[in-house]
Amino acid sequence: MASQELTGTTALVTGASSGFGRATTVALLAAGANVVAVARNTQRLAESRDELGGLLTTVTADVADPIVAGSLLEQHRPKTLVLNAGASPLMRPLQHHTWDTFNRNWEVDVRQAFHWTREALLLPLAPQSTVIALSSGAALFGPRSAAAMPAPRQQSGSSPPTAPTNPRARDSASASSRCCPS
């Protein structure tokens, strides 16, 4: 997106208090967009507001809540919606997880993407609006923490198991690298 396309428009970024979300917020502000930064961390949002000021509006909220998604989209009507929020996974072997710790990423990452996308379609956003959903490489290739997972047991004399290949993930990865013109 060229910066002149963003000047004076509204962008809404989830997970905006740190990492990619904060960097995206900074870039959108630099391109002239009015940015609504949404995250759970009030202190980090306040620090961003103090540092970036100007066209930045901060909202402390749980982005996995469908009511938050619908309310903020209706209130701000963004031309650009960046779905970046995500929970940091608890890195430990499976046998040390509970169901709640294991599915935390689904409950935050997937839930927020679903609710915000659904609400954007129901509203709907204005024609030519853009929705960007970020994800980690683990979505295509699995987590880097696979080494922390216990190795499968094998019977003596058997070959070690091999990782299954997923041609759809491989095709998606190559498609994503060429999807966006520079």
Image (cartoon, helix red, strand yellow):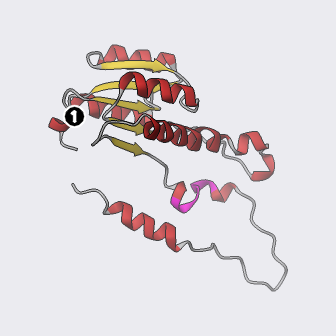
141 in magenta: yes
Task: Judge whether 81 appears above or below 95 on screen.
Answer: above
Of 110 and 23, nearer the camera is 110
> Is label 1 in a helix, a strand or a loop?
helix
Task: Judge whether 21 appears above or below 155 on screen.
Answer: above
Image quarter of the N terminus: top left
Q: Position of residue 179 (x, y in %)?
A: 31, 60
Q: Amino acid at mark 1?
A: Leu
Q: Position of residue 150 (x, y in %)?
A: 75, 60
Q: Is residue 35 left or right of residue 4?
A: right
Residue drawn 34% across the image and 13% down it: 50
What stretch of residues is rendered in magenta?
140-145
Image quarter of the C terminus: bottom left
Residue drawn 71% across the image and 57% down it: 149
Task: Judge whether 92 appears above or below 63 on screen.
Answer: below
Q: Is residue 10 left or right of residue 63?
A: left
Residue drawn 40% across the image and 37% down it: 124
30 in magenta: no
Mark 1 nearby-residue class (10 Å; few <14, some 14–19, many ≥20): some
Q: Quadrant of residue 14?
A: top left
Q: Quadrant of residue 129?
A: top left
Task: Judge whether 45 appears above or below 161 on screen.
Answer: above
Q: Position of residue 130 (x, y in %)?
A: 33, 42
Q: Residue furthest left?
A: 4
Q: Is residue 30 left or right of residue 113?
A: left
**Which SS does the magenta portion mostly show?**
helix
Of 153 and 38, nearer the camera is 38
Of 128 and 167, nearer the camera is 128
Q: Which residue is mark 1?
A: 6
Residue drawn 39% across the image and 38% down it: 82
Q: Position of residue 157 (x, y in %)?
A: 81, 86
